[in-house]
Image (cartoon, grey):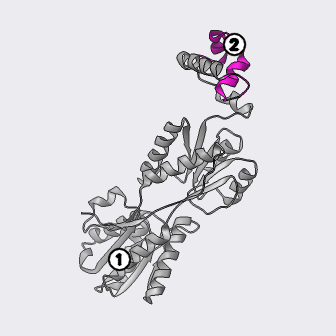
Amino acid sequence: MAGIREVAREAGVSISTVSYALNGSDKISEETRQRVQEIAKGLGYAPKLAARTLKGSKTNIVGVYISGFQGEFYGELLDGMQHQFDLLGYDMMVSSGSRTHKFLSEKLFDGAIVLDTEFQTQELEEILKSGHKIVVLDRDMQHENVRTVLLDNISGSRQAVDYLLAQDLAHYFVISGPRGNHDAKARLEGAKARFQEAKVAFEVIEGDFNECAGYEAAKKIQAQVKNQTAGIYSLNDDQAIGFYRYMREHKLDLSAHYKLVGFDNNRSADFLFPTLPSISYHKHFWGETAARTLIELIENKKVSSKIINTQISFRE
């Protein structure tokens, strides 16, 4: 792999001219820029990231911060981001854990997408003040250097509750999500508002967006409902899967007494019986939208925050 000196030697120009050509500077002619870029490409030029970072130049690398790597949720989302970043000429580094936050503050990244509740809002605010560009998917923030690309959780929850209310059941429950999680809070607020409008009583069972939480919720609901009917809105599909697992392990007939609806429309739920209706959104599109929004923000283009639509989906 060639470095900047080899490119300069081959092009017969100075190192500074190569730097101008590769960094989009207007200090050289367009003809020279194109010639140097073609030579650099032909030689397989690979700029040293550390050097670019020290100079405060663009790295053409963006960070993506997520809470963890477990479950299927992130697969389609990250694939959508990767696809869009490839088209726009940027590389993506996916990180989890507070130790990697310094990569953004130390300008290893040109910007970042954040879907990580462990990344504290106060810390993000300090980073934004330094001029860093960020797109958040898990909280509502206002700053000139931040944009939000959020799910329409409220609408999705209202659709979920409407589906359950149409079943005319004896009891209604909501299995909530982790405390402090933006999506969990918004979904719960949407569900509460719709139940209250319908003047129908319901109970919240605390959850944590994982199968174990759904399993434990099923145990509590089964003990309370016994042989009566109940509608359950699980604020994500993983909890609903845990609910199904409890019923199967205890040889209970879920279809006779319960109606469930989830959120996320995960592919793993395709194997559940009876089928699980779920609030759906296009994860790949969400990732693409977040990536495109970040790059437009980094490149100082006029760009607004976005809302990703949700709708109830019924499996065949």
Label 1, secondary structure: give it: helix
Residue at image coords 41%, 56%: 282
The reply to whether the magenta stretch includes residue 2 is yes
- Disc 1 marks a residue whose amino acid type is Tyr
Query: Can see residue 300?
Result: yes
Q: Which residue is mark 2?
A: 13
Label 1 or label 2, whichever comes before in sequence order: 2
Relative horizontal placement of residue 180, taking residue 76 as reference (left or right): right
Residue at image coords 59%, 52%: 114
In the picture, the disc for residue 163 is 1
Along the viewing direction, whichever of 223 and 33 lies nearer the viewer: 33
Query: Can see residue 222?
Result: no
The reply to whether the magenta stretch includes residue 254 is no
Location of residue 261 with respect to 302 vertically, above or below: below
Mark 2 residue crowding within 10 angstroms, few (<14) / some (14–19) / many (20+): some
Along the viewing direction, whichever of 199 and 31 lies nearer the viewer: 31
Residue 24: x %, y % from top left: 66, 29
Residue 125 falls in which quadrant of the image? Answer: bottom right
Relative horizontal placement of residue 233, taking residue 93 as reference (left or right): left
Residue 65: x %, y % from top left: 57, 49
Residue at image coords 35%, 70%: 243
Give the quarter of the figure containing the C terminus.
Answer: bottom left
- Disc 2 marks a residue whose amino acid type is Val
Relative horizontal placement of residue 214, taking residue 20 as reference (left or right): left
Give the magenta part as a residue range. Answer: 1-29
Residue 227 falls in which quadrant of the image? Answer: bottom left
